[in-house]
Image (cartoon, grey):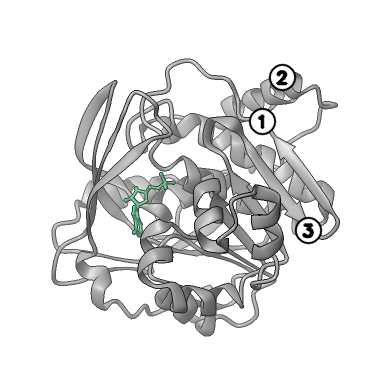
Amino acid sequence: MSRILAVGSVAYDSVETPFGARSETLAGSATYFSLAASHFAPVAIVAAVGEDFRKGDLDLLGTRGVDVTAIERRPGRTFRWAARYGSDLNDRTTLSTELGVFAEFKPTISAEQRKSSYLFLGNIDPDLQRGVFEEMAQPRLVACDTMNFWIEGRREALDRTLKIVDLLLINDSEARLLSGETNLAAAAQKLLTMGPNALVVKRGEYGAAVFGKGFVHFVPALILDGVVDPTGAGDSFAGGLVGCLAALDRRDEASLRLAVAAGTVMASFTVQGFGVEGLVAATSQAIAERHADLSRMAGWAPSKLPLRPAR
Ligand code: AMP
């Protein structure tokens, strides 16, 4: 089965939403990604954490089947991020980003992990993303996510990283920021000239669109009760999407369509809990049922997600 290697943040977040607040909770782009992807394919995280990282959090990832052997514990503090959401949950204000041990991180990847055929470059410094790519034997698919922090602060490094990316995942405001185009179709066309040959634009509660060579496909988001914290929705979406592509080991139009649905389903669990609570509680059965709900809601013919045996 195809294996995924994911680089990104493993973090402690402090988040306030109109529905409550959590401080110093396990989070980060690589954490959400791998918890979601592990339902479809084996996944390993490449990241650094500080001396303050709780053993129980590493155990939680391990018990979900995530390979944590390339998470390095280093002197210093774990990455921390703080944000506040207003009554419109699409509107978030970042209060602080502290890179901690990521400021000086040079990853070490085992010979086995170098052979992973799927590489996910999660939201983190673009030079670190490219550094991991350069260590890899020959991945079949390189997917990448980024955010305004890196688009605004590390633009040249990000442009270099985009050149090695097959599939870019980005939200709509970041697509506009990165392309300099206000119209989404024009932004997508521009981004497809910058390296990636497929692009997924995430539009929060309004769904996601995949732009490939000669096709565009749109998947609505599920209309959900009990949304309390949207943090990590984008990374969980990426985990479902890349996990599904790795399980199918294909990237044609039909596979991308199913993979965007898988991403949509995984993100729907994340937003129903604070931090990783909603995602951790999702079982294979609940994931399959929610995919059936999404298919009914969107009027698609029934299909099956390529989930691993029940977990
Ligand atoms: P999302 O809501 O999908 O955009 O992801 C939010 C997660 O990304 C949080 O758990 C943060 O810890 C993490 N995060 C926020 N800013 C950054 C950044 N600049 N680099 C890496 N990870 C970040």
Q: Position of residue 76 (x, y in %)?
A: 13, 68
Mark 1: secondary structure: loop
Q: Amino acid at mark 2?
A: Met
Mark 3: secondary structure: loop
User: Is the residue 84 above or below the residue 80 in the image?
Assistant: above
For label 2, the residue is: 297
Write down the quadrant of residue 291 in the picture.
top right
For marks 2 and 1, give the CA distance: 9 Å
Residue at image location 71% in from the left, 23% down from the top: 292
Q: Is residue 311 visible?
A: no
Residue 220 — which label?
Answer: 1
User: Is the residue 288 above or below the residue 25 in the image?
Assistant: above
Q: Is residue 67 left or right of residue 197?
A: left
Choose the circle earlier in sequence order: 2 or 3.
3
User: Is the residue 208 above or below the residue 161 in the image?
Assistant: above
For label 3, the residue is: 250
Q: Nearer the viewer, mark 2 or mark 1?
A: 1
For the residues bearing labels 2 and 1, Cβ distance under 8 angstroms: yes
Q: Amino acid at mark 3?
A: Arg
Q: Amino acid at mark 1?
A: Pro
Count every numbered label the image shows and give the total: 3
Q: Nearer the viewer, mark 2 or mark 3?
A: 2
Q: Position of residue 42 (x, y in %)?
A: 56, 56
Q: 10 Å neighbourhood of mark 3: few (<14), some, or many (≥20)?
A: some
Q: Is residue 4 left or right of residue 70?
A: right
